Image (cartoon, rainbow, N blue to C red):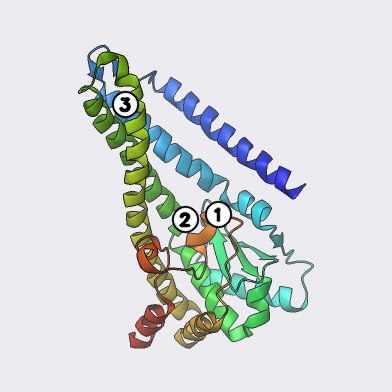
Amino acid sequence: MAFMKRIFLFMAVNLLVVVTISIVLQVLGVHGYMTARGIDYSALLVFCLVWGMGGAFISLALSRIMAKWMMKVKVIDPARASGDAAWLVQTVHGLARAADLPEMPEVGIYESPEVNAFATGPTKSRALVAVSLGLLQNMDRRQVEGVLGHEISHVANGDMVTMALIQGVINAFVMFFARVIAFAVSQQVKENARRTVQFMVTIVLEILLSFLGMMVVAAFSRWREFRADAGSARLAGREKMIAALEALRRSTGLVDNRQAALAAFKISGRRGGMLALIATHPPLEERIARLQRAV
């Protein structure tokens, strides 16, 4: 049943993206970018920007809903919360007020052995901060507060919107250059083979250029993690953030991959070898060292 729900959600989101972007292109009067003379570069640029940015921002708009569904986050009702749940909500709201957020984020818990947490949402006013049961079971309240400060810093810094913007621009440029280069290559073969060659070269180039784009996005994400660590040091206290990272380093490193799109917004992630180039998080040792060096 859960698997069917995920398939339905995936299809519904993709249908929404396609329909929305198709309407936008119609409104902008972009019906195609190929003409008898070749590529209409202005139309192609608009086409790629709408598809690249549109997909990224629609996903952002749905991020909170998708996170709740895919990760099975149980949102805590502040009016009915008690015990650890009440403390969790009070701590998040206290940090949010210290960070001058316009609205209090939703707070939730998801069942997973991973020692992790994440923040998501389309705006600072519609954010969600969720922690795993594994984190609550393996960290004390002082360490959890450091983690929560980190996630609130992501929200306060507008990181979700910035990441969507960067990803959208990268998507647009990948689409644009893949099609321009593929068209140039197709002109070097016989006319009856041009469409096939252009299609195949476009696919290959999109894969290669997307990988290069991932490195750019990941590099920004790693810088963003250092900034969120520093934000937590200001909001919750440097020692609490260091203690949280030390606890993460001692943990088993279990990762819940049910929603890969949330990986960049969690407190920690895996890396290694060539994958370090596309790692969304810096090494925990480096993060701890930076906080220890901070005045």
| Residue type, numbered disc 2 | Met
Callouts 1 and 2 close, C-beta under 8 Å: yes
Q: Image quarter for residue 227?
A: bottom left
Residue 276, percent across and down?
37, 66
Question: Circle 2 is placed at which residue position?
Answer: 160
Dot 2 surroundings within 10 Å: few (below 14), some, or many (20 or more)? many
Q: Image quarter for residue 27?
A: top left
Question: Circle 1 is placed at which residue position?
Answer: 121
Residue 72, percent across and down?
70, 57
Q: Residue furthest top?
A: 36
Residue 251, percent across and down?
57, 80
| Residue type, numbered disc 3 | Gln
Placement of 118 over or under 21, stated as above or below: below
Question: Circle 3 is placed at which residue position?
Answer: 198
Front of the two marks 1 and 3: 3
Residue at 76% across / 66% down in the picture? 79
| Residue type, numbered disc 1 | Gly
What element does badge 3 sit on?
helix
- Inter-mark Cα distance, 1 to 2: 7 Å
Front of the two marks 3 and 2: 3
What element does badge 1 sit on?
loop
Residue 256, percent across and down?
60, 64
Placement of 267 over or under 32, stated as above or below: below
Dot 3 surroundings within 10 Å: few (below 14), some, or many (20 or more)? many
Q: Of residues 136 and 231, which is closer to you in this image? A: 136
Residue 88 shows up from this direction? yes
Q: Of residues 62 and 2, which is closer to you in this image? A: 2
Residue at 34% across / 20% down in the picture? 195
Ranked by sequence position, the earlier of labels 1 and 2 is 1
- Inter-mark Cα distance, 3 to 2: 35 Å
